Image (cartoon, rainbow, N blue to C red):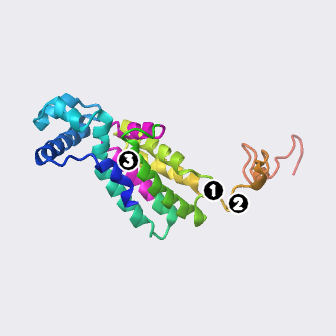
Amino acid sequence: MASGTAGVTEGRPRRADARRNYERLLTEARTAFTERGTDASLEEIARRAGVGIGTLYRHFPHRTALMSAIFEDEVEALLARSRELLAAPQPCVALLEWLRAIVTHASTYRGLSRALMAAHSDDGSAMSRCSMPMLAAGSELLDRAQRAGAVRAGVDIADLMQLTNAIALAVEQSPDDPELADRLLTLTLQGLRARPTEPSQPPRGGEAPQVGDAPGAGDAPEVGKAPGASEAPEAGDTA
């Protein structure tokens, strides 16, 4: 998995002066993106790095390439964390912890979660070079949780990552609600968990269960009636 980010790092310049410009641009871009989001002015980033805008574009042909280079360090940290969590005793909790780390990292730069969501449908984008190793790492954690019977069959890592990025976007839009991420991830966990009555593998034959066929479907109390409540006596009846 460690080789998964090779496509992200291969663009680093080799000449000493070019490397200095490259690193200064990354430093100023991190600051600008943290303070003002990923739509911060590229001209201002170049000015603060002490280079011309042409130098910035030589290193980073477009904004997404700059975002990808900045997110590289976060990707490396998240990949390392995923490898550690593969040894965690509770596979489902390990998966959820890794998703929480993704939300935290994506929320650092306003606009990053939206870019990661867009990369899902554009394999040729610069951001996809970050998202692809993340998908591979997440798939290992998800497979482990599914093999343990903790996560229901049929959950797809690409869908789960899109949901995680959507949670990060919601957190980004709600800075005054520090508990939002945990609440939404808890809801996600509830949807992921395998139910005791569910088969460990999807049903064969291609036939979906009919409405009402789910185990215990007819056992739920009627709306407005408490479980085990006795029938009210008819009008005029005496006990």
Asked if labels 1 and 2 touch by Cβ distance under 8 angstroms, the answer is yes
Task: Select label 3 or label 2 by which is in front.
Answer: 3
**SS of the residue under disc 1:** loop
Q: Circle 3 is placed at which residue position?
A: 130
Residue labelled with disc 1: 153
| Residue 238 on image: x %, y % | 88, 48
Residue at image location 49% in from the left, 44% down from the top: 163
Kindly give the residue lying farthest to the front in the view shown. Answer: 15
Q: Is residue 27 above or below residue 79?
A: above
| CA–CA distance in space, label 3 to label 2 | 35 Å
Which residues lie in the magenta part? 97-121
Residue 215 in view, yes or no: no
Q: Earlier in the sequence, mark 3 or mark 2?
A: 3
Q: On the image, numbered disc 2 is attached to which residue?
A: 199
Res 114 → quadrant: top left
* Residue pictured at 80% horizontal, 52% vertical: 230
Residue found farthest to the right: 237
Labels 2 and 1: the sequence-earlier one: 1
Residue 136 % position (x, y): 46, 55
Q: Is residue 47 left or right of residue 141?
A: left
209 or 191, which is in the foreground?
209
Q: Amino acid at mark 3?
A: Cys
Could you tell me which secondary element the residue under label 2 belongs to?
A: loop
Residue 6, percent from left and from top:
34, 53
Indicate yes or no whether the magenta region holds residue 191: no
Q: Name which residue lies at 45% across and 69% down.
A: 88
Say whether residue 165 is left or right of residue 207. left
